Amino acid sequence: MNPDRRTFFKAGTGSLGALSLGMLSCADSGRAPETAIPIDKTIRPLGIYLANHLQDTGMHTWGIDRWKRDIRDLKAMGAECIWYLPIQFGQRSVVDFAPGAPYWELQKSICTAIADEGLEVGIAIGYNDVFPETLEEHPSWQAKYGKYGMEQAHACPSQPEALKEIMRLRERVFSEIPRIDYVLCPITDYGGCACEKCAPLPETYLRVFSEQTAVCRTFHPGVKIVAAGWGIDLNEEDMLRGLIRQAEWIDYVAEIPRGVKPIMKFYMDPEITMAGGWGSYGPCPLLSLIRRSYREEYGYISGSVTYSEGIHDDINRFAVLAFARDPNRSVIDVASQYTEEWLHLTGGDVRSVAEVIAGLGNGIGVQLGAYVHPDDGVDNPRADERLNVLIDVRKHAPALSDNYRYWLLHFRAVYESLSVTEGKIDIDTLLKEIGTAREAFRRLEPEYGLFLDQKSRWSKPELSPWNWPRTFHHAWNRENGFIR
């Protein structure tokens, strides 16, 4: 995904808006009971796409042991396939792809680890990026930027010599990755070229992708091909729709264009990984939105491989896998299962923490490097209550201190408290809790901890109190105390 699209939400409501700690039942709210959706087919493939590129929240720095742990965990959560991004050429160097290069050996090992768990393997590729060094040597190959989400080092596929290099790189990927069951390639974000020779882009995209598919099938005859039309205008979308209708070599579309091939649910509704701060403030649980989406689309989709950029959306991954199998389940049911199986809680703690999970996801109240207004803040009156539940549970379940999934929820809860102007928890306690969480990540998940440590100081209320409603309110009252 394009890093320029990262946004940090200042205010608003999240997955549950004004509901208290958790979900209200239909009986409690006076609404009519929902109609059960018949479970008459299996959504397949069912899995997660681990988008390991420079925009993720730490995965691209994992070693193989950490990859294996995540793969095993996702299998235990119900995944039947895992996709990943073995190489985004524009973000790497020629040395990374050399024979025996540690980076490339790791990418092949990731594939083997997925297959060794009995899971199907999918890979994502861009259809026209090359190494940056190659464009430095051949500047005339440079794709035209400006219209499409292209990211780094794209070559114009309408130039024969550039296309030859593009195809050479893809052939090496297809020949050396030991198993490929699915290939996803979007038309843009990242990919494309806005030059006149490449117009109309839908025709160029399918021409190049079809050539790459033919090469891939020489090494992996049973591979399934997934096209995607996000990032283009609606006229181009309609053109792409018509072309894909005739493209027998395409097996699925990832979300769009719809109406021509089986739909692979991917990231559009809802988007689980960038929402609520892109991992900068822990997870943004979206269980009710995920449930609603699968209830609305259950009869129309054939597969689900949801886009994820890191461990911060662990609870959302779990929810996707659960609701894709059975959209009749309640939010509290799925949150309770997660609490039992992955936080290892029992008794009343299960329900209490499940309600916290169901209630998290409200807006984060941060300004991008500017002072907030003294009265600014998110409407989230139960924020401190949720955080107190998590703190209290940790006191009588000390094993949570070594569970990074607990700290993800805790971290989010602290930031939601900091996004409210006033509350029941004092500033010193909030800053202590956020520091404790950061230290836990450095100890338990150092790659994610490093991601957090590298964020700008304005995202850290202990360093920039003027950027957060709770700390601003406290600091402003303190300063005004010197003139009154």
Image: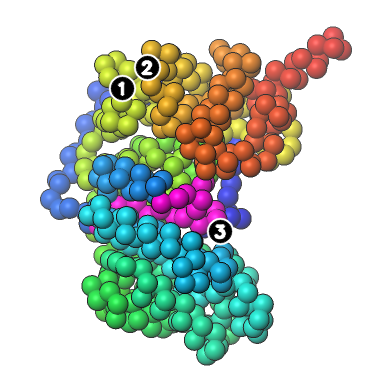
Alpha carbons under labels 2 and 1: distance apart: 8 Å
Alpha carbons under labels 2 and 3: distance apart: 40 Å
Looking at numbered disc 1 in the image, what kind of residue is underneath it?
Leu
> Considering the numbered disc 1 on the image, is that residue within a helix, a strand or a loop?
loop
Question: Which segment did they paint magenta?
Answer: 45-64
Residue depicted at x 32% and y 32%: 342
Q: Which residue bears the numbered disc 3? A: 2
Q: Are marks 2 and 1 in contact (CB under 8 Å)?
A: yes
Looking at numbered disc 2 in the image, what kind of residue is underneath it?
Ala
Residue 79 makes an appearance in the image: yes
In the image: residue 478, left or right of residue 154: right
Q: Earlier in the sequence, mark 2 or mark 3?
A: 3
Q: Which residue bears the numbered disc 2? A: 397
In the image: residue 427, left or right of residue 321: right
Residue depicted at x 34% and y 60%: 111
Residue 375 makes an appearance in the image: no
Q: Earlier in the sequence, mark 3 or mark 1?
A: 3
Looking at numbered disc 3 in the image, what kind of residue is underneath it?
Asn
> Considering the numbered disc 2 on the image, is that residue within a helix, a strand or a loop?
loop
**Mark closer to the observer (2, 3):** 2
For residue 345, the mark is 1
Q: Position of residue 377 (x, y in %)?
A: 61, 27
> Considering the numbered disc 3 on the image, is that residue within a helix, a strand or a loop?
loop
Q: How packed is label 3: few (under 14 Cα within 10 Å), some, or many (20 or more)?
A: few
Q: Earlier in the sequence, mark 2 or mark 1?
A: 1
Q: Position of residue 181 (x, y in %)?
A: 28, 66
